[in-house]
Amino acid sequence: MTRVFVFTNHKGGVGKSTSATNTALGIAGMLRRAGAPNSRVLLIDTDSQAHATLVTTGTKDYGTDNSLYTVLMADRQNAAQTLLNCIVQSTWDADLHVLPGSPMLEGAERELMGIAGAPYRLADPLSRIINRYAAVVIDTRPSFSLMTEMGLIAATDAIVPVEPRYLETVGLMSVIGKINDIREGWRQPNLRVSGILITKMNTRIRGHNHLLDELKTHTVLGKLLVGIIPANEAVSYAHQNHQSVFNYDPQAPASKAYAQFVGKLVQRIAKGGV
Ligand SMILES: Nc1ncnc2c1ncn2[C@@H]1O[C@H](COP(=O)(O)OP(=O)(O)OP(=O)(O)O)[C@@H](O)[C@H]1O
Ligand SMILES: [Mg+2]
């Protein structure tokens, strides 16, 4: 079964798109270096801001005919073929493919609201073509909207990026509760909360260290911690240049931390289990 990693948190600006894009590239590179027979990774952008699309393809000029919107609006019989037609190669790596997001997705939520089966409009066609990929990574918008629900329903592993200043236990527990609601409510036994990824960590800020210590000792959340990405200006520079942080500066602290995190995900892909 191809693992589908969805990065989600209804808080804005916590590093969902940064993590989704760099993780997708990192998985492709790591699998290739390990000699895996298939190292192709598909990045799906479900956010109408299309930031992940912009940095990985150099444009967010996708819409009615060539984006995730097209797939969602397609006749259900043709949806899988439409999805294949809309996938583009990223500018980052030949093995990193992108199903682009689009500003049109904003309207798609309204257009699809109330249509039977709407939440499955991504999961269904994706399941029919997923064998072509070693892994899929989904970026979501900062809200629990229909688009995010679609991303979660299509996924096997939910990863929650969170800044140390937002680490309130209550907030995190509610995100995890929401993901578990999707799992139960939509009968998606394959979906699970697979990890909490701390982003923009600054060890010189006492509050950050304090919150991290609290998280580590929390009975539920402590076990879910899968990585800590330092606050690092290389990330902003990489964004400005539409580059991955690995490519911008492989030795940057954020690159090393993302590589470590990706290593854990690749181990899971290889094991096929937890
Ligand atoms: N580790 C980091 N160090 C420094 N800056 C970072 C780091 N990670 C992300 N950023 C910056 O934080 C901002 C938000 O990041 P990003 O777009 O990935 O968050 P997001 O959760 O996807 O946002 P949104 O909720 O709007 O989709 C960006 O300007 C990005 O460059
Ligand atoms: Mg984003």
Image (cartoon, rainbow, N blue to C red):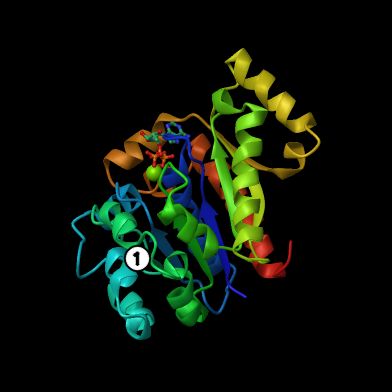
Q: Is residue 201 above or below residue 225?
A: above
Label 1: element kind? strand
Residue sitting at x 42%, y 55%: 146
Which one is in front, 115 or 224? 115
Q: Is residue 195 above or below residue 26?
A: above
* Residue 264 percent location from the top left of the image: 66, 54
Report crowding for label 1: few under 14, some 14 to 19, many 20 or more residues within 10 A (C-alpha).
many
* Residue 262 percent location from the top left of the image: 58, 53
- Specify the quarter for ligand 1: top left
Residue sitting at x 51%, y 50%: 7
* Residue 86 percent location from the top left of the image: 29, 72
Tag 1: residue type?
A: Leu
- Whether residue 206 is visible to the viewer of this picture, yes or no, is yes
Determine if the C-beta at disc 1 is less than 8 A from ligand 2: no
Q: Residue furthest bottom?
A: 77
Residue sitting at x 68%, y 18%: 210
74 lies left or right of 180: left
* Residue 4 percent location from the top left of the image: 55, 64
52 lies left or right of 59: right
